[in-house]
Amino acid sequence: MTSKLDINPIKAWLPHINNPLLVSGPCSLESEKQTIETARLLAKDKRVFVFRGGIWKPRTRPGSFEGVGSIGLEWLKRVREETGLLVGTEVANAQHTEEALKAGLDVLWIGARSTTSPFVVQEIADAVKGAKAVIMVKNPVNPDVQLWLGAIERIHQAGIHNIVAIHRGFTPFQETKYRNYPNWRTYIELKRLMPNLPIICDPSHMAGKREYLYEISQKAFDMGMDGLMIESHCDPKCALSDAEQQVTPADLAKLLDRLIIKNENANNPDFENKLDVLRNRIDSIDTELLEIMASRIDIVKQIGKYKSENNVTALQINRWAQLMDSRVNLGKKLNINETFVKILFQLIHEDSVRMQTEIMDEK
């Protein structure tokens, strides 16, 4: 079921925008000099609309730099006065929110750890009632689209209509080249549930390293996202937090120059006609897939009944290992992504075991 929340497009609160929304600035504000220098350099690029800077930075473990605190609000106000950029920061509780609103910040965002807690989100929602600020909501650390959706709904119930979701990736369950696993299907599901919700990508937190920023940013635009939040620092190597994922304003400009922004639709009748033909073929194949899955389910139920009659467990790990190996090898021969095959058959097998267990419980 899709959600029909009254959420404004970006152009409603940023009428002069003429390209995707770009939010940029340091991971952490470290000094007034670093803040203003970075902002001045970013403001030269008219593709940047919002200056970001973390001032409250609770880390996973204590002992590292945790932000300059409330003094950073004054620096952000100076950035807006000198550059004309909108300014924003992350808020993690009601007190942060109240201070940021009192300082007149234009944009506040809720971080991934905060989104995980409905209690924290509700406290922030209560604090923003009646505010004019734009509220951005990062995805929770785990790929739970309902938790993400719920956080957005709580902010909307507070009377906020200028809302943007931020896709920053998820804590990986295994080692990957990225700091946070993209898991694009969670973004797709959120977009399906809230078609009118603006969603931007945070390649910095997704990548964790500068060298992956371009490929993630391009992927975000290929997926139809509305913009990017990229961390930029006047001297990244000296950054007190997340130094490896920040770029200089000059390198940010070079990255943006390389990106190709795709359109959702093409003004070409021939393109649309050919696309319809291909989509019809996809629809037919999907129908066949579901019919085949229905036949497989019938056989799974027969197996479950047979196991039950012979007092055999539903899960047989050796059979599962053999099945997974054979499917992955076949997928490789058919040039199908190995990770996709593993995830697909993990889901299929888990549901098969569930059905067989239910049959055994009935006995």
Image: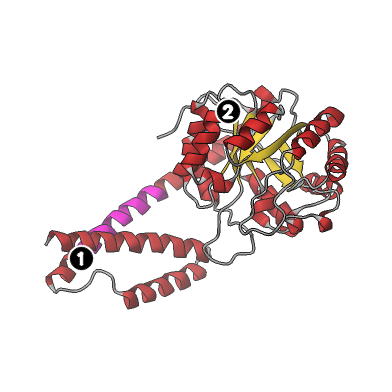
Instruction: Give the left or right position of residue 336, taking residue 316 as reference.
Output: right
Residue shown at 47% from the left, 44% from the top: 145
Residue 11, compared with residue 41, is above or below; it is above
Residue type indicated by callout 1: Gly
Determine whether the residue tagged by mark 2 lies in a helix, strand or loop.
helix
As measured in the structure, the alpha-carbon distance from the residue carrying label 2 to the one carrying label 1 is 54 Å
Residue shown at 58% from the left, 67% from the top: 175
Closer to the camera, 299 or 237? 237
Question: What colour scheme has been applied to the protein in the rendered image?
Answer: secondary structure
Image quadrant in which you'd find residue 345? bottom left
Report x, y in % for residue 66. Answer: 69, 51
Closer to the camera, 131 or 291? 131
Report x, y in % for residue 43. Answer: 84, 36
Residue 15, compared with residue 269, is above or below; it is above
Q: Quadrant of the C terminus?
A: bottom left
Determine whether the residue tagged by mark 1 lies in a helix, strand or loop.
helix
Residue 240, compared with residue 310, is above or below; it is above
Q: Residues within 10 Å of mark 1 (few under 14, many from 20)?
A: many
Instruction: Give the left or right position of residue 103, taking residue 330 as reference.
Output: right
Viewer-side label of 2, 1:
2
Report x, y in % for residue 58. Answer: 64, 50
Residue type indicated by callout 2: Val
Q: Disc 1 marks which residue?
A: 304
Range drawn in magenta: 285-303
Mark number for residue 120?
none
Residue shown at 76% from the left, 39% from the top: 72
Q: Disc 2 marks which residue?
A: 128
Q: Is residue 289 magenta?
A: yes
Instruction: Give the left or right position of residue 300, taking residue 218 as reference.
Output: left
Report x, y in % for residue 136. Answer: 61, 36
Q: Does the magenta stretch include residue 259?
A: no
